[in-house]
Amino acid sequence: MDRPLIAVPIGDPAGIGPEIVVKALADKAVREAARVVVIGDRRTLSLAIGQTGSSLRLRPVADPAEGDWSPGTLNLIDLDNVDGASFRPGEVSGMCGRAAYQYIEKSVALALSRSVDAVATAPIHKEALKAAGVEFIGHTEIFGALTGTADPLTMFEVRSLRVFFLSRHVSLRRACDMVKRDRIVDYVRRSLAMLTSLGVSSGTMAIAGLNPHSGEHGLFGTEEVDEVAPAVEALRREGFDVEGPVGADSVFHLALQGRYNSVLSLYHDQGHIATKTFDFERTIAVTGGMPILRTSVDHGTAMDIAGKGIASAVSMAEAILVAARYAPFYAR
């Protein structure tokens, strides 16, 4: 069986994306797990190869089917959309924001046409997107729009820990207001469906508590009593294997120990802190609930070190490995 074919858009050309993509493709584990076609700009990738001292050879292709998967080859779909004369690593620009969006757009088109099995993304820069007039705040929103998905699901994975998020980029006050029975029920249904699509069909999902000690039966807040527990009861009546609320100070540890196959975090930082503290570089974002599979590094463009060839590629390599592991299930 052929290794999964993964599209890798290089992210913002002025960030560390190009260099970590180059480094990741030199990783033997990545080469053995996946066939990778890079979506980017030839001049930018040539610069990154020089910055990192890589021996990879650029091979422009018009279609992933033309790829040469022998060691030492970087197959590139060159969109030729970066002006070398005005390009500066580490500088935010509308040109680079627009280029980053176009790399994603091309990757999504390839995935939707089944020319590739999944997409693994490098970091983009929100200010650069705004400067380019791109009306999205991040990858998830872009993928949702391009695939016609109203509310894509985000799952973080680091080793045996999988975390879903009831809310993402909203204020903490707003996130607390979003802890509602019906929303929890909807998210758990869809999250468990996503797990099934990834080949994970057994185990219990835990719903994290919102307040300290899950509110101590209303002493420290009533969200668990009024919203979380009723949601869990409703889900169990439907036959879903769920448990909660489980105190957020222990639920992630218990999931790492194997008690739960996943956790629903009730707000952004609750799950981010847990996963990134455990292993920052190997925390990978998986976007599901869409017709295509997308994984991503969970760090930014690191403009302060861009172009120096010193950025770690551990997360980029891990994102490709996770995409390759789940793609055969997701494609069914």
Image (spheres, rainbow, N blue to C red):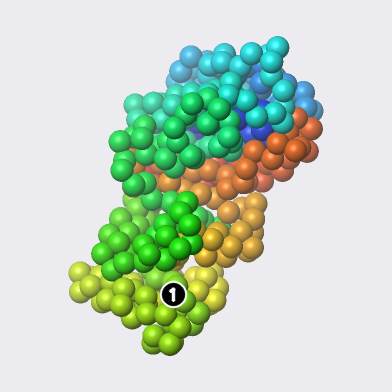
- Bin the neighbour count of mark 1 within 10 Å (Cα to Cα): few under 14, some 14-19, many 20 and up: many
Position of residue 175 relative to residue 198, above or below, is below
- Give the residue at the far front of this rendering: 173
Asked if residue 35 can be seen in this view, the reply is: no
At 32% from the left and 59% from the top, the residue drawn is 187
In this rendering, position of residue 6 left or right of residue 59: left
In this rendering, position of residue 164 left or right of residue 122: left
At 79% from the left and 32% from the top, the residue drawn is 308
Quarter that holds the C terminus: top left
Q: In terms of depth relative to the viewer, which is nearer, 286 or 57? A: 286
Q: In terms of depth relative to the viewer, which is nearer, 222 or 296? A: 222
Q: In this figure, which residue is indicated by the disc labeled 1?
A: 209
Residue 9 spot, x, y in % from top left: 54, 30
Position of residue 139 relative to residue 10, above or below, is below
In this rendering, position of residue 96 left or right of residue 167: right
Residue 309 spot, x, y in % from top left: 77, 33
Residue 327 spot, x, y in % from top left: 42, 42
Quarter that holds the N terminus: top left
Position of residue 22 relative to residue 33, above or below, is above
Residue 78 spot, x, y in % from top left: 55, 16
Asked if residue 218 can be seen in this view, the reply is: yes
